[in-house]
């Protein structure tokens, strides 16, 4: 349970990558300012987080199951938080999808929007009433540079992040008068499983109906340059966790 003076932080998607590192960083805060509720859709994946959290596990860090695509799971998770009191919600869970629109089914596209867009909306809808009652709170959303700029063959992922940017910009104005902050974080490339999955997607990619120039541009220009960018400028999950900590301080 949180000590008085500790802020309750709930983070989505903590089984790996950025979410895991944010949870570990906040739970190990030198002044113990945060009581971290690290959530993941499958608690069987908890070992990496528990190991990385060290002594903080069971003290400043606890775990709850949460699938942001399920209304029921979201409700159950928030009901399991004492008094439903969350000071800071960090919407981190997200999925990528790379490939030409011609080769992606509408169902696959919906899965991306269910997670990256409606997943965030579901969480905000669930915590907002209690934050409004207390007239305090901070909602953080992990967007991406692709929430600001379109990128070839990332059409659906980019669209899901753009949608979230628009939603949050509009919401921020309404939340301001309840003293609730809404912050977006827009990382460039970060070395996580996201990157690994993206490279696997590239290897399997097919280009039905895509014109030869676009395929050539993707293979000969975009891919080599984005690999260079990843190598030269790719950030670590620790970098993003430090940035997130600054945002909520
Ligand atoms: P990872 O693939 O390492 O982590 C994604 C996390 O989201 C996993 O814990 C995954 O859980 C979880 N997740 C997926 N679907 C759901 C769901 N329905 N409910 C709950 N959790 C879910 O990727 P990153 O750490 O890199 O990505 C984290 C966020 O950062 C994403 O929103 C991504 O868009 C964003 N981002 C990433 C960048 C990058 O280059 N890596 C760049 C810019 C933004 P599970 O293990 O169960 O799949």
Image: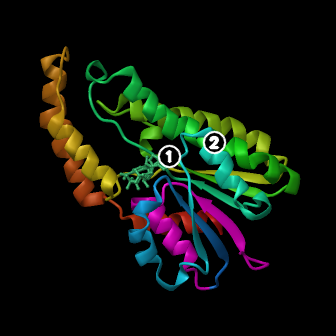
**Residue drawn 31% across the image and 24% down it:** 104
Q: Determine the secondary structure under disc 2.
A: helix
Whether residue 194 appears in magenta in the rendering, the answer is: no
Q: Relative to 79, say whether 99 is above or below.
A: above
Q: Position of residue 207 (x, y in %)?
A: 17, 23
Total numbered badges shown on the rendered structure: 2
Q: Position of residue 10 (x, y in %)?
A: 62, 60
Q: Determine the secondary structure under disc 1.
A: loop
Contact flag, marks 1 and 2 (Cβ < 8 Å): no
**Residue drawn 47% across the image and 39% down it:** 147
Give the residue number, with chain letter if any, for mark 1: 143
**Residue drawn 27% across the image and 30% down it:** 99
Q: Nearer the observer, disc 1 or disc 2?
A: 2
- Depth order, front residue of 233/195: 195
Q: Quadrant of residue 49?
A: bottom left
Give the residue number, with chain letter if any, for mark 2: 72
Read off the magenta span.
1-30
- Depth order, front residue of 162/120: 120
Whether residue 29 appears in magenta in the rendering, the answer is: yes
Q: Position of residue 232 (x, y in %)?
A: 24, 59
Q: Residues within 10 Å of mark 2 (few under 14, many from 20)?
A: few
Q: Position of residue 152 (x, y in %)?
A: 29, 30
The label number, if any, that marks residue 124 in the structure image:
none
Which image quadrant: the C terminus?
Answer: bottom right
**Residue drawn 78% across the image and 40% down it:** 174
Q: Relative to 47, say whether 130 is above or below.
A: above
Q: Residues within 10 Å of mark 1 (few under 14, many from 20)?
A: many
Badge 1 or badge 2: first in the primary sequence: 2
Q: Is mark 1 within 8 Å of ligand 1?
A: yes
Which image quadrant: the N terminus?
Answer: bottom right
């Amino acid at each position: 349970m949180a000590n008085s003076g500790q802020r309750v932080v709930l983070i989505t998607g903590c089984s790996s990558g950025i979410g895991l590192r944010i949870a570990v960083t906040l739970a190990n805060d030198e002044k113990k300012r945060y009581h971290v509720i690290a959530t993941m859709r499958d608690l069987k994946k908890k070992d990496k987080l528990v190991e990385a959290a060290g002594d903080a596990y069971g003290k400043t860090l606890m775990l709850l199951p949460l699938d942001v695509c399920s209304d029921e799971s979201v409700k159950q998770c928030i009901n399991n938080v004492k008094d439903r009191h969350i000071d800071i919600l960090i919407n981190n869970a997200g999925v990528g999808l790379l490939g030409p629109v011609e080769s992606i089914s509408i169902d696959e596209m919906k899965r991306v929007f269910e997670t990256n867009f409606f997943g965030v909306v579901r969480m905000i809808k669930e915590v907002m009433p209690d934050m409004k009652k207390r007239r305090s709170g901070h909602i953080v959303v992990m967007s991406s540079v692709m929430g600001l700029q379109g990128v070839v063959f990332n059409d659906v992922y980019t669209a899901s992040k753009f949608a979230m940017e628009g939603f949050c910009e509009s919401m921020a104005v309404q939340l301001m008068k309840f003293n609730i902050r809404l912050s977006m974080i827009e990382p460039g490339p970060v070395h996580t499983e996201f990157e690994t999955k993206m490279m696997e997607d590239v290897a399997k990619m097919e280009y039905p109906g895509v014109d030869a120039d676009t395929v050539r541009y993707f293979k000969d220009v975009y891919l080599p340059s984005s690999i260079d960018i990843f190598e030269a400028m790719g950030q670590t999950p620790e970098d993003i966790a430090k940035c997130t900590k600054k945002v909520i301080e």
